[in-house]
């Protein structure tokens, strides 16, 4: 059994939009993303063009290639967040490894 496929049109749109942004910012072609991520060029093109759903594994591999957390590809507003991703990643790590008291504090902030 393969990786689950993301079929929700809104999520697919968000992934495609974020990939287009990251391709532009990094000045990469879809071919370069394919080479760096191991996701086939055809699949990258289909994801960016929102033609088909994509596998969760492909999302992780493409995020790894861009050196961003996988959840960043699912977030609205990636274009505006820039360096905030590093801050968000640190916050998520603190949340995962922190005490119940710290989690409550972060949730109430």
Image: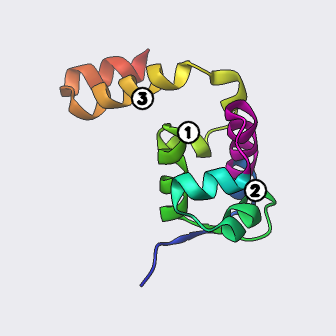
State how far apart marks 1 and 3 are (Cα).
Answer: 9 Å
Residue labelled with disc 3 = 89
Q: Position of residue 41 (x, y in %)?
A: 68, 65
Q: Which of the pair 109/67 is nearer the observer?
A: 67
Q: Residue at x 73, y 48 (%)?
A: 29
- Nearer the observer: mark 2 or 3; the answer is 2
Mark 2 vs 3, N-terminal side: 2
Mark 1 vs 3, N-terminal side: 1
Residue labelled with disc 1 = 72
Secondary structure of residue under mark 1: helix
Q: Position of residue 97 (x, y in %)?
A: 21, 31
Secondary structure of residue under mark 3: helix
Question: Quick check: is 21 in the magenta stretch?
Answer: yes
Q: Which residues are magenta?
A: 15-29
- Tag 2 and tag 1, C-beta contact below 8 Å: no
Residue labelled with disc 2 = 48
How many numbered marks does the figure carry? 3
Q: Position of residue 90 (x, y in %)?
A: 37, 24
Q: Is residue 43 left or right of residue 107?
A: right
In this view, the residue farthest toward the left is: 99
- Tag 1 and tag 3, C-beta contact below 8 Å: no
Q: Is residue 50 left or right of residue 93?
A: right
- Nearer the observer: mark 2 or 1; the answer is 2
Q: Which of the pair 69/14 is nearer the observer?
A: 69
Q: Residue at x 63, y 51 (%)?
A: 33
Q: Which of the pair 75/79 is nearer the observer?
A: 79
Secondary structure of residue under mark 2: helix
Looking at the figure, which quarter contains the N terminus?
bottom left
Prevalent SS, magenta region: helix
Q: Residue at x 79, y 62 (%)?
A: 50
Residue 53 vertical position relative to residue 76 in the rendered view, above or below: below
Q: Residue at x 48, y 37 (%)?
A: 67
């Amino acid at each position: 059994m393969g990786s689950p496929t993301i079929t929700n049109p809104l999520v697919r749109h968000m992934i495609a939009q974020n990939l287009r942004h990251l391709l532009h910012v990094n000045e990469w072609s879809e071919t370069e993303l394919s080479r760096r991520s191991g996701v086939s060029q055809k699949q990258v093109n289909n994801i960016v063009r929102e033609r088909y759903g994509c596998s969760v594994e492909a999302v992780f591999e493409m995020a790894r290639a861009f050196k961003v957390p996988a959840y960043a590809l699912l977030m609205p507003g990636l274009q505006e967040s820039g360096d905030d991703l590093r801050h968000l990643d640190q916050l998520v790590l603190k949340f995962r490894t922190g005490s119940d008291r710290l989690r409550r504090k972060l949730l109430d902030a």
